[in-house]
Amino acid sequence: SQQGEEDPQALSIQEGENATMNCSYKTSINNLQWYRQNSGRGLVHLILIRSNEREKHSGRLRVTLDTSKKSSSLLITASRAADTASYFCATDRSQTGANNLFFGTGTRLTVIP
Amino acid sequence: NAGVTQTPKFQVLKTGQSMTLQCAQDMNHEYMSWYRQDPGMGLRLIHYSVGAGITDQGEVPNGYNVSRSTTEDFPLRLLSAAPSQTSVYFCASSPRTSGGARNEQFFGPGTRLTVL
C-alpha cells in the first residue's frame, strides 16, 4: 500500500484541551493535506502545506511538516465538541498534472463536552 | 453552487449486477476522481480524470470503468458487482493546477454500496 499512517488511531480528550495527531508517509511529496470527516459524511479540506513549508496556521489549526522525517502533525487548540470527527492526512506525490492523493488510515477524535 | 453531488446515496446490489454511480460538479473543475473507503483502510484512488476525454487508473481500478465526456460529469461503472466492492464511494474534484501548485480537493457526500 502507498498510504501514509496516522497515529494515534483514536484519541479522546476533554473540551478545551489540545489535540495532536501525527502522520507519517514514505515517499517524496508535493504537498500534504489534512481532511476532516464527520460520521457518515464526505471529507472536508482543512489545510494544505507544501513541501517547502515547515509550519502553517489556520484558525485553531496548526500543521507542521518535516520532510526529512517524512512526517506531519496536526494540532487543534482549544478543542470543541464539534471537532469530534475522523481526521485524515493525504499526500500529493504526483509528478504529472494529476492531483492524486494518497490517504492515511485516519485518527478518530472524540471531544467530550 | 451545489459543489460535488453524488447519486444514489445508498445502493444494494446482487453479485453479478452492474450499475453506475453518478458524480457531477458545478465548479468547472478539470480534475475529478473516485475513491473507495473501507473500514480501517482510509481512502484509495480508483480512477481519475484530468479533463474531459482523459481518464486514467488509480490504485484499485479492477472491476470499475469510468468515462469523462463532459467537464461536469464523471460516472463510475461497476461491470459485474462482487462482495469485495462493498464500500463507500466518494467522488472528488479540484481546479486545474497551475505553475506546479496543487490544490485541495472537494468531496461529494458519498454512495454507500452493499453487494450481496
Image (tube, coloured by chain):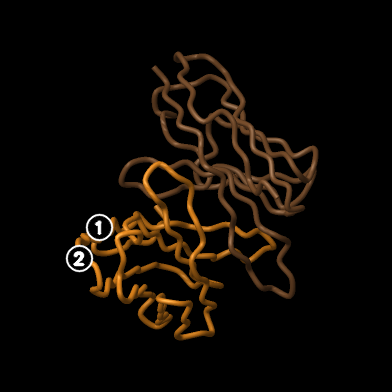
Chain colours: A orange, B brown
Marks 2,1: beta carbons within 8 A: yes
Mark 1 lies on residue: A110
Left or right of A49? Residue B25 is right
Mark 2 lies on residue: A13
Left or right of B90? Residue A87 is left
Image coordinates for residue A37, horizontal then vertical, percent: 41, 53
Residue drawn at x 39%, y 67% as measured from the top left? A25
Image coordinates for residue A34, horizontal then vertical, percent: 45, 65
A1 or B34: which is nearer to us?
B34
Residue drawn at x 49%, y 21% as measured from the top left? B81
B59 or B90: which is nearer to us?
B90
Image coordinates for residue B54, horizontal then vertical, percent: 75, 46
Left or right of A61? Residue B91 is right
Q: Alpha-carbon distance for marks 2 and 1?
A: 6 Å
Left or right of B66? Residue B114 is left
Q: For numbered disc 2, what is the local secondary structure?
A: strand
A41 or A27: which is nearer to us?
A41
Give the amino acid type for the residue marked by disc 2 in the picture: Ile
Label 2 crowd bin: few (<14), some (14–19), many (20+), radius 10 Å: some
Quarter of image, res A16: bottom left
The tally of labels here is 2
Q: Which quarter of the rendering shows the C terminus of chain B?
A: top left
Q: For numbered disc 1, what is the local secondary structure?
A: strand
